[in-house]
Structures are given as structure tokens and as C-alpha cells.
Amino acid sequence: MTFTLSGFDAWTFQIVFYGSLLVLEALRDDERLSTVLDPMDCTRQRAHALIRQPSCTLVGR
């Protein structure tokens, strides 16, 4: 299930499990940014931080 956040209209977000990790992914066109979430993290704050300062990105073809 994906969701959007106001202020980031071009992005959609999803929360997924990779093994025991809870991961927030931001998706836009061929870009996918991701960050690991801690159980008590605020999803909205982490999403804003991920878009403002991504540390890694994968570009699909």
C-alpha cells in the first residue's frame, strides 16, 4: 500500500519489511529512496528527511 504526503506531490511512499527491517521507501518515476525505520520513528518526519537528504538512491531503467 502506498501513501502520499503534502508538500511532496511528486512522490509516493510505502513501508515494507525486508527480513526483520522496517523500511520506508520514497518512489518517483524511476527513483527509489529508502531508509530503515525504528519502531517509534515518526513516519512523516523520516519521509521529509529522506527526501531532503537522501544518502543513497537506486535508479531503475
Image: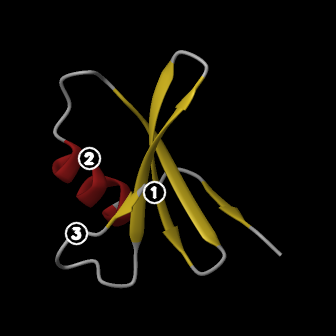
Choose between 16 and 34: the one closer to the eye.
Answer: 16
Q: Please name the amino acid that badge 1 sits on.
A: Pro
Considering the numbered disc 2 on the image, is that residue within a helix, a strand or a loop?
helix
- Image point (16%, 39%), residue name: 42
Comparing marks 1 and 2, which lies closer to the viewer?
2
- Residue 40 falls in which quadrant of the image? top left
Residue linked to disc 2: 46
**In the rendered structure, are the residues bearing label 1 and label 2 in contact, judged by CB atoms less than 8 Å apart?**
no
Quadrant for the C terminus in the image:
bottom right
Choose between 23 and 59: the one closer to the eye.
Answer: 23
Q: Please name the amino acid that badge 2 sits on.
A: Arg
Comparing marks 2 and 3, which lies closer to the viewer?
3
Q: Could you give the CA–CA distance between mark 1 and mark 2, rounded to whole angstroms?
A: 11 Å
User: For the residue carrying disc 3, how many other residues have a C-alpha within 10 Å: few (<14), some (14-19), or many (20+)?
Assistant: few
Q: Please name the amino acid that badge 3 sits on.
A: Leu
**Residue reaching furthest to the right:** 61
| In this rendering, position of residue 55 left or right of residue 59 | left
Mark with earlier residue (2, 3): 3
Choose between 14 and 32: the one closer to the eye.
Answer: 14
User: For the residue carrying disc 1, how many other residues have a C-alpha within 10 Å: few (<14), some (14-19), or many (20+)?
Assistant: few
Residue linked to disc 1: 54
User: For the residue carrying disc 2, how many other residues have a C-alpha within 10 Å: few (<14), some (14-19), or many (20+)?
Assistant: some
Residue linked to disc 3: 5
- Image point (36%, 64%), residue name: 51
Considering the numbered disc 3 on the image, is that residue within a helix, a strand or a loop?
loop
Using the image, determine if residue 11 lies above or below residue 42: below
x, y (%) of residue 3? 32, 63
The colour scheme is: secondary structure
Q: Could you give the CA–CA distance between mark 2 and mark 3, rounded to whole angstroms?
A: 12 Å
**Residue reaching furthest to the top:** 20
Q: Could you give the CA–CA distance between mark 3 and mark 1, rounded to whole angstroms?
A: 17 Å
